[in-house]
Amino acid sequence: MLNSILGSRDRTSPVMHCPAVPHKLADPIQTNTIVTWEEPIAQDNKDGTIE
């Protein structure tokens, strides 16, 4: 009987998608402002989405 373990090397780098950084100026009368943005996404072809 012959047992073997087959595997594959992941030769493809992960892919990162980083949305543009928003620019927002605070109102001169206010001491703060709210800024929102999309979360970056990382994916790998072997393991799927990276969290």
Image (cartoon, rainbow, N blue to C red):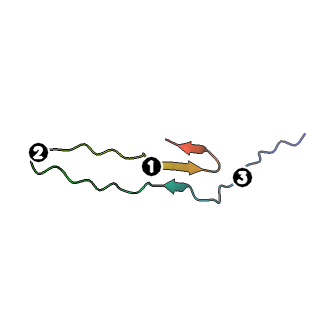
Q: Residue 18 carries which label?
A: none
Residue 51, relative to residue 18: is it above or below?
Answer: above
Q: Where is residue 50 in the image (x, y as percent from the top left)?
A: 52, 44
Question: Looking at numbered disc 1 in the image, what kind of residue is underneath it?
Answer: Pro
Question: Looking at numbered disc 2 in the image, what kind of residue is underneath it?
Answer: Thr
- Residue at x-position 73% and y-position 49%: 7
Q: How crowded is mark 1: few (under 14 residues within 10 Å), some or many (20 or more)?
A: few
The disc, 1 or 3, on the residue closer to the chain's N-terminal end is 3
Q: Quadrant of residue 3?
A: top right
In this view, the residue farthest toward the right is 1
Q: Which mark is residue 31?
A: 2
State if disc 1 and disc 2 touch (CB < 8 Å).
no
The disc, 2 or 1, on the residue closer to the chain's N-terminal end is 2
Q: Is mark 2 on a helix, strand or loop?
A: loop
Q: Distance between the residues labelled 1 and 3?
A: 28 Å
Q: Position of residue 22 (x, y in %)?
A: 33, 54
Q: Can you identify the residue that label 1 sits on?
A: 40
The disc, 3 or 2, on the residue closer to the chain's N-terminal end is 3
